[in-house]
Image (tube, helix red, strand yellow):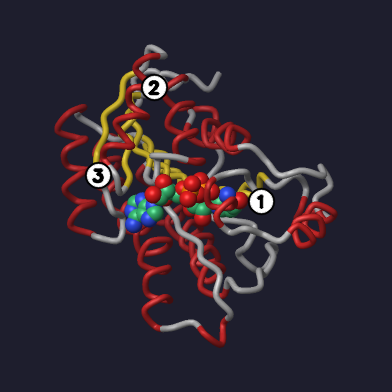
Amino acid sequence: MFDLQNKIALVTGARRGMGKSHALILAQQGAKVAVTDISKEECEEVVKEIKQRGGDALAFRLDVSHVQEIDQVFGEVVQQWGRLDILVNNAGIYFPKPALELTEEEWQKMLAINLKGQFFCAQRAAQEMKKHGWGRIINIASVASGQVGVGIAGGAHYTASKGGIIGMTETLAIEWAPFGIHVNAIGPGAIDTPMVQAAQIPQAAMEAMLRQIPLGRVGKAEEVSAAVVFLASEEASYVTGATIYVDGGWLAA
Ligand SMILES: NC(=O)c1ccc[n+]([C@@H]2O[C@H](COP(=O)([O-])OP(=O)(O)OC[C@H]3O[C@@H](n4cnc5c(N)ncnc54)[C@H](O)[C@@H]3O)[C@@H](O)[C@H]2O)c1
């Protein structure tokens, strides 16, 4: 089960953090992986690691907020490997700012990367996947997405983007089901990555957050990658339009 031999995957924001983990684990399952991020050099390092472990990968610079760059890079991947089967829409940013102080520029930046980028990567991927009648698109959302998720003080722009991803995922799942393309989202809880380290959450706030998480700890990137592998696989044949929360039970509490 969960064999990804002969599958072609593209991961955005894959130079570090969860994206890197997804790229390594997809390759370990047999997929050829396009490792993309804003720094090609750092993607090359991930490619090196994949190759050392016997996998196959290519590095690309891709800023997901530029639609033209998306078109170009996805085109190059298809030119190299003939197809695209799996997209992990992982690239994202987070910077806290009280809602009363948010500027239009900050709002636009967050939405351009976290939401617009995911949509146009999904659209470009689906154009390729439709040709072969099979595809898996995995959009990385967050528990910070409202409704069943949670709000997050200082994150109005972030939660708007992540909530948008869940609505978009459900809509794309409906539109693209006839083409054999499954679209799902993953809502990670607090995962130990450079993003969370950079947020410098005060100790008291961290302890308060951990008290709300039944498993009592932050998660590891690989624990989210496990859900990515499942959703990318043939075994997810009856799963589309879903959001899987990998959050240590946070939303259940
Ligand atoms: N760490 C957490 O607790 C957590 C929780 C929920 C959701 N997430 C989401 O998981 C995803 C991965 O985050 P992470 O925690 O690994 O953080 P991270 O900061 O380590 O990784 C994010 C990656 O996205 C890349 N990126 C930023 N702007 C980009 C752009 N314009 N184009 C392409 N790539 C760009 C960064 O270079 C970085 O490599 C993000 O979408 C994030 O919102 C993280």
* Ligand 1 closer than 8 Å to label 1 CB: yes
Q: Tell me the number on the disc at residue 61.
A: 3
Q: Which residue is mark 2?
A: 49
Q: Is residue 213 left or right of residue 154?
A: right
Alpha-carbon distance for marks 2 and 3?
A: 17 Å
- Dot 1 falls on a residue whose secondary structure is loop
For marks 3 and 1, the one nearer the N-term is 3
Residue 55 horizontal side relative to residue 198, left or right: left
Disc nearest the viewer among 1 and 2: 2
Residue 221 x, y percent position in the rendering: 58, 37
Whether residue 176 appears in this view of the structure is no
Question: What secondary structure is marked by label 2?
Answer: helix
Residue matched to label 1: 189
Name which of mark 1 and mark 2 comes first in the sequence. Answer: 2
Report the disc number at residue 232.
none
Residue at 56% across, 75% down? 156
Are there few (<14), some (14-19), or many (20+) residues within 10 Å of tag 2? some
Mark 2: amino acid: Glu
User: Is 195 placed above or below 164 here?
Assistant: above
Callout 1 amino acid = Gly
